[in-house]
Image: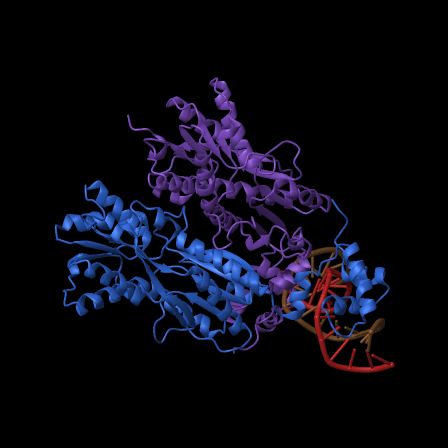
Chain colours: A blue, B purple, C brown, D red
Amino acid sequence: MSKAKATSIDIAHLAGVSQATVSRALRGSPLVSEETRERIRAAAEQLRYKVDKNASNLRLQHSGTLALLLFEDPTTDGSNINPFFLSMLGSITRACAHQGYDLLVSFQQFSTDWHADYADSKKADGIILLGYGDYLAYLDRLEKLVAIGTRFVRWGAVLPDQPGVSVGCDNFSGGQAVARHFIEQGCHRIAFLGDASSHYPEFFERYRGYAEALQQAGLDVDQTLQVDAESTQMCGHTAMSELLGRGVAFDAVFAASDLIAIGAMRALAEHGYKVPAEVPVAGFDDIPMARFASPPLTTVLQDTRSAGEVLVDSLLRMIRGEPAQSMMLPVKLMVRQSSVRPA
Amino acid sequence: MSKAKATSIDIAHLAGVSQATVSRALRGSPLVSEETRERIRAAAEQLRYKVDKNASNLRLQHSGTLALLLFEDPTTDGSNINPFFLSMLGSITRACAHQGYDLLVSFQQFSTDWHADYADSKKADGIILLGYGDYLAYLDRLEKLVAIGTRFVRWGAVLPDQPGVSVGCDNFSGGQAVARHFIEQGCHRIAFLGDASSHYPEFFERYRGYAEALQQAGLDVDQTLQVDAESTQMCGHTAMSELLGRGVAFDAVFAASDLIAIGAMRALAEHGYKVPAEVPVAGFDDIPMARFASPPLTTVLQDTRSAGEVLVDSLLRMIRGEPAQSMMLPVKLMVRQSSVRPA
DNA sequence: CTGAAAGCGCTTACAG
DNA sequence: CTGAAAGCGCTTACAG
């Protein structure tokens, strides 16, 4: 199609210098005279020369690339990615660009033996782990990663004694804020839709915050008001139907994620309940569609923008051999119509 | 942290063979006896060996990687990526994984001199171009890409005589379908919100489809019913306000994208108009939040899933040196509440 | 300030 | 079926 790509030798010939000098000039070494450098730059431009990254990386023993591994729970229908992760992906991409790193994106089946392939094969200098799934099943993989010295950060619940570095939001406070918001409006029997066990620590923290708020208000934490659900609309719909089927009284619904909340609202509507007049509802995440739900969904904002920056910064710090710690990001209750009973 | 990564030489020593044989065995060459191969596989596993991609790629002169360049219009607020592109990104990622390719994701300022850096530097074997922006300004870059033999596909309007390979949906038919849907309900003065010039060919095709449907129905195409807007909610809001300010009569609104439609619906609500009772509205794209808009938004589905597959397949075909052509994907009108006047 | 040379870790003709 | 050797295109100590 077009003649083969120019190499540094071609530039050297054109500029009348050695190949080594071309490399130095282009990498900005101070050992090259301005005059020579200019000549080389011109030659490089003329031949549309670009440093071969494979050769350069091989020599430098690094890649200038970060890998983002997106885990998806295999139980989801697989056709659409959770919008929360998509927006994390957007912010991580931006943060990488800012730092001059490339970002390799990959979906992983939770079952595959993914650990460290990217790092071991030198395709990436470090790894960002993103996604839900059974945390306990995932834990020993993390430990293995730490053991072999792979640099990685993960997004998720930030708990004591975790392997590696984690970045997550303050799920506990978020759960607390939602529960308090309902309690302030006089709700006493607040249902919780979402898994609440150490298998899903993010949801569990939200649940713990919710339970704490109830107890502080002198309210019971009633197990029959909790229904397991993973983060999809369908699960939300199912869980809500399940709750309605139980026949227990409740006066508010706290869904562990926005997708669950949206599914739950649909179930409520199908059963003839009015949100928020009869049942106030709140979610968690503040995905883009939350504000466009009907009614607009009260939720807890996870700031994906700063989350992406913190993830990338922490990882880069580890790559440079600097210390990096786990970090918990603040959340913010976004009160919208779905949770506010008309006066 | 941990000892240096194992190389093929380490494996060779361990397995008692030459380094060349290790390479052959691991690449599945038939020139290696099963017995030897097994021994090597075991040694590799024991040392947790992974082929160094930089070395391998350098030798093989390819990268096994595709680059996705996401252009964003610099006039948007920059904090959030268009959800439509996000879902394209999701589907492209999946398609790449399917084909065993890695995906490098990068945001590009429309102004930067992006062309072919990824390909020239051998970081990627081919490029996928995604994003709006002034098409005319972008055209000569495409031509340059073609000239230097870069393999790429772009998502966008599929027009005659375009440089390179394009994949896009049938915007014309989509626009036509929306207009007809309104006309069937007796609407005569359908406003169009969105740019309608060759600078934005996707919107323009939608507009042309709309105009064609009007003419076929014997209706006027009234220029005062068209308002420029880029694909953001804010622009939609502004455009709708502008239209209302003009004081011209209209009985339906066709927004060139869902984001525009959602912004327009908010403006309509602020001005006291009921959708769809007083003004039916439709959008384009079918982004996830469309069905959760209030009322749920009638729109034109672009099948991002197959779009991603077609983009990746076409690019891979080009990389293999096979012929690849531009392709137009079918669309589907999704009728929801926002466009249907109550009887 | 510049050049000759070694070497990063692979893959694959070439020879056996 | 296996090994010795060349070479992919860089970067950087070493020598001048």
- Image position of A115 (left or right of B64): left
**Residue at image x 75%, y 74%?**
A30
Instruction: Give the total of numbered labels.
Output: 0
Left or right: B119 as drawn, with respect to C2: left
The reply to whether residue B10 is in sight is yes
Q: Residue furthest top?
A: B218
Q: Residue at x 65, y 70 (%)?
A: A60
Can residue B37 be seen? no
From the top left corner, tell me how far across and down residue B226 is, in percent.
50, 32
- Residue B6: percent from left, percent from top: 57, 72
Front residue of B167/A124: it is: B167
Quarter containing the C terminus of chain B: top left
Residue at x 51%, y 47% (from the top left corner): B92
Task: Please say if A99 is above or below B91.
Answer: below
| Above or below, comparing residue B290 to residue A69 in the picture | above
Place of residue B106 in the rendered image (x, y in percent of width and height, measured from the top left):
57, 55
The relative height of residue B201 versus residue A311 in the rendered view (above or below) is above
Rendered view: B242 above or below B86: above
**Looking at the rendering, which quadrant does residue A218 occupy?**
bottom left
**Res A332 quadrant in image:** bottom left
Question: Residue A63 sits in which quadrant?
Answer: bottom right
Q: Position of residue A76 (x, y in %)?
A: 35, 50
